[in-house]
Amino acid sequence: MKNISSKILVFSLIAGLTLFNSACTKDLLDQIPTTDLGAAQFWQTEADATTALMGAYSAVRPLFDRDYYFDGQGEYVRTRGTSTTSGNLRLGDAYNGGNYNPTGYGASFDKYYRYLYGGVNRTNYVIENVKKMLPTASAASKPGLEAVIGEARLLRGMVYFRLISMWGDVPYMGNIIYSNDEVANLARTPIAQVKDSIMADFTYAFDKLPLKPSALGRAAKPAALAFRGKMHLFWASWNKFGWPELDNFAPNVTEATASYTAAAADFKAVIDNYGLKLFRNGEPGEWGTMGNADILPNYFYLFMPVANGDGEQIMAFTHGGTGTGQGEELMRDVAGRTHEGSQCWVFPYYEIADRYQLTTTGDFAEKLIPTNPSTAGARTKPNSAINPASYADRDYRMKSSIMWDNEMSIGLTSLKSTGYTPFIYKTWNSVVTINGVKYTSYNTDAAVYGYVFRKFLRNYGGLGRSEGDYAYPVMRLADVFLMYAEATNELTGPQADAISLVNQIRRRGNLPALKPEKTASKEEFFKAIEQERIIELLGEGQRSFDIRRWRAIERVWNPPYGLGVWKLDTHGAQRDRYFQNTSELTYQQNYIFRIPPGERDRNPNLTQNKPWL
């Protein structure tokens, strides 16, 4: 492969092969893929093909493994500013510069767009070269080579799925790009055609991949089926709810029904045919005690390295851990200075706490009351947001996912434990006494709503803030359960098997089964499904894509030109106001992203999405 000039930057990002070389000091965009050295000699064996595939995984991984940032475009997770850092070669900076606030984000993903196309070209490189090996391959090696192509096509399908989910019509390339001339005048391909190509990729992958992954982080048949089902589900959603900001897209009820049907079939096959189970059989484990982290529910450990390779992780991207330059950034992004100097880019809004239901009733508790700590009895008042007792008897996923006042985590410095540290909002790095014991409180003044995440926060020493070795899931079995329930509910209303699956997910939170009124109608069951998606998938990058495909931004944030929504903290202070007097145009721009102007400057045939004209 030639080294492509950055003149047309969209297609210059094939250098993803070198993305994780922490010692590299050159411009990543100028690197020649190492697998191209001696290409005539390289593409000879199945081992060569697998080596090249690992390069494709390395290029695609950083396009998905920080998707938790996208939750900031919803209403339950705050992502500070444009987030992420520049200059960190491990990241590749694909997410850098993106706006992860609830509104005004659609013009901020030019870099992400370019990196996605880098992933496309890197997967095409594997697909085309391995295809050339097939005619002379032995009968014994041919299935392995086809499986390599299948994995590369799955990755390519995932990347194009992300592209159309954000930008709608996008240029489609199904081959290696060797020269700028090949793409200088390439027009956008209608979304329906790109969708069909994505489906073809997922179907080929399903046909050729093994029943089980050959190694941690590798894909197998369930992943291909799950992603194909998800593509069907999104296509059904767009056809049901419409996408008026996308030119030349006309929603079609008949097509929506066919796609919901196909989605349900794919999800059902994933659920029934591969022996997959929820992590630790979906059992809740133990809550432990209030303000203690010695014992935590099972859901917490689903997001720790102990879950790497678990059957619930249908598709996950691996990370190298300490000293490899290929670690994940989860602790750095969700924790504060007390934890290896982490930066707390991502933390919960106050409102998420009220979404956690009671284990006693299976329904919502009375709303928490934001309370100024200087108020008499503030920390003992019933339902006070700063009274730790207000959080008792809640969904076990609350204890696993967020921390409120007096909840403990283990501080970490130089890879070693510094002992328990209590989170107490606005009491940063101070000596505090709880139950007669002195502690130094959690230092994280970046979290300004009264909570921090426990989900993704390692509760042990040995790893630096950017050295995590957790295999980050991009497709989980619980998500498949919920997507199956959604698809079948759209077709025929609440069905017994779908209700059972939702109840299995609730079981991991130690919640009772849904009450009959929650499944009495299609509308009520959808609310129950959405509730579980909010809680189960919190901080995993799903919420913003859900509310866009459901056309739910107005429902979540109120209609255009309204008073907006104040976000309060647990002390009752007004922190941020969103969607105040926001124009209809801004809402439209939230539903579809801007085609990067720099790409349009270089290519006169790239049209712009309507809200951005």
Image: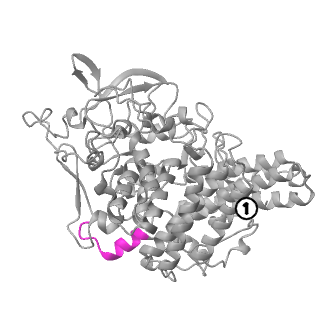
Asked whether residue 535 is drawn in magenta, I would say no
> Where residue 511 sits: x, y (%)?
34, 41
Way the structure is coloured: one colour
The location of residue 543, given as percent across then percent down, is 41, 56
Relative vertical location of residue 534 with respect to residue 565 in this rendering, above or below: above
Tell me which residue sits at (51%, 65%) in the image. 233
The residue closer to the viewer here, 339 or 602, is 339
The percent position of residue 184, horizontal first and vertical second, equals 67, 76
Q: Give the amino acid at mark 1.
A: Asn
| Residue 17 vertical position relative to residue 239 in the rendered view, above or below | above
| x 48%, y 58%: residue | 483
In the drawing, does residue 576 fall left or right of residue 145? left
Q: Is residue 141 left or right of residue 557?
A: right
Compared to 459, does 309 lie above or below? below
In this figure, which residue is indicated by the disc labeled 1? 124
Give the prevailing secondary structure in the magenta stretch: helix
Residue 414 as seen in the image, left or right of residue 351:
right
For residue 327, above or below residue 189: above
* Residue 563 figure quarter: bottom left
Residue 7 in sight from this viewpoint: no
- Report the span colored magenta: 579-591
**Split into 4 quadrants, where in the image is the C terminus?**
bottom left
Describe residue 560's horizontal placement relative to residue 184 as left or right.
left
Instruction: Say few, some or many: other residues with alpha carbon within 10 Å of mark 1 (under 14 / 14 to 19 / 20 or more).
Output: many
| Quadrant that contains the N terminus | bottom right
Q: Position of residue 104 (x, y in %)?
A: 37, 65
Badge 1 marks a residue whose secondary structure is: helix
Of residues 22 and 301, which is closer to you in this image?
A: 301
